[in-house]
Image (tube, grey):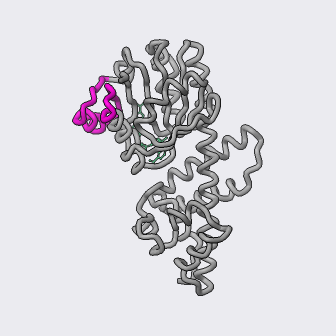
Amino acid sequence: MANVAFIGLGNMGGPMAANLLKAGHSVTVFDLVPEAVQQLVDQGATSAENAAAAVEGVDFVISMLPAGRHVEGLYLGESGLLNVLNSSAVIIDSSTIDAATARKVHAAAAEKGIAMVDAPVSGGVAAAAAGTLSFMCGGSDEAFASVKPLLDGMGKNIFHAGDSGAGQVAKVCNNMLLSILMVGTSEALRLGADNGLDPARLSEIMLASSGRNWTLEVYNPYPGVMENAPASNDYKPGFMNDLMLKDLGLAMETAVHSGSATPLGAMARSLYASHVSKGNGKLDFSSILQSLGGND
Ligand code: NAD
């Protein structure tokens, strides 16, 4: 069993750290919010005064922070963790951040002889609690092999996407595609309903036809079609529009870096930006269907 420091105990990090404790690892935690720390201490974690104290003598550091600037602040600079970590420790950053920042932290860690894996997740809060997240990892073969047993305690599918930053790129590719599928499925259901079709019957037809996709299979955006989908629960998340917009912004940044054409991704980003600007940030991302208006 490993000695792990876990930094960032929010909606995702809290349940992920709890699963590491359940798997029998020794976990030292730190977050800026004392209540978040206390919740983990109640489950058997050790608390630390600050991030530097949390990483003393650990085998792994896992960070689960809001954005790239938080990750950069945690590891780089004079007070950064790279200055206090043992070179035998391995960094796992599971935050969803831009690939350029991930690569920058990878490179700075490598200079100190410290291995790192960027390991963003797909699956949301429910999957974090159930230990069924998908991890998309970027880093060397050796670094991936060393973190895989630990990630197995928090996830179901652990992928090695490629070298440094590849996990972040895989994550934004997936979420960009997901947003496009959600908008497309919403449009098709809206068009059908506006022309007198029952959305449940239309969903059944498209599921058995070439329009079949994940949003129709498990996450139908039309209210009442799928009992357990957020659409049938006033669009309570699920996966918030705010987070989808964040990920689409990262996808667009990545596309600018690589000079890639992403016309539908850009359109989806713009649709989600408009939807969020109307006060829908905290609703589930399937609520994009509501932005299409309609005849009912
Ligand atoms: P959150 O805002 O709930 O949690 C972030 C935590 O980090 C907070 O508790 C905050 O206090 C802490 N924090 C910030 N800066 C810190 C610092 N310097 N030191 C210690 N703690 C610090 O966010 P979340 O929903 O848990 O998401 C975390 C990451 O996971 C984000 O990058 C997000 O995009 C990604 N993600 C979220 C979901 C989701 O459904 N919530 C799904 C997949 C990926």
Q: Which residues are magenta?
A: 21-49
Find out whether residue 2 is within the magenta segment: no
Taking the image as shown, residue 19 lies to the left or right of residue 105, namely left
Query: For the point 57% across and 74% down, which residue is it?
Result: 203
Give percent across and percent down for residue 241.
51, 56
Q: Position of residue 218 (x, y in %)?
A: 50, 62
Q: Residue at x 27, y 26 (%)?
A: 46
Decide if residue 146 is on the left or right side of residue 250. left
Q: How far across and down, in percent of the image, does residue 136 sit?
A: 56, 38
The residue depicted at 52 percent of the width and 38 percent of the height is 158
Residue 239 is situated, as x and y percent measured from the top left of the image, at: 47, 54
Instruction: Pick whichever, 204 or 100, lies toward us.
Output: 204
**Residue farthest to the front, as pictured:** 208
Q: Residue at coordinates 39% horizontally, 30% vertically from top-left? A: 7
Q: Is residue 209 left or right of residue 17?
A: right
Is 27 located above or below residue 157 in the figure? above
Placement of the N terminus among the 4 image quadrants = top left
Instruction: List the single residue furthest toward the bottom.
Output: 196
When the figure is inspected, residue 293 is found, relative to residue 75, above or below; the finding is: below
Q: Is residue 255 left or right of residue 286?
A: right
Write down which quadrant ligand 1 falls in.
top left
- Residue closest to the eye, 113 or 265: 113
Above or below: residue 54 compared with residue 13: above
Q: Is residue 27 magenta?
A: yes
Q: Quadrant of residue 13?
A: top left
- Picture quadrant of residue 9: top left
Q: Residue furthest left?
A: 42
Nearer the observer, 29 or 51? 29
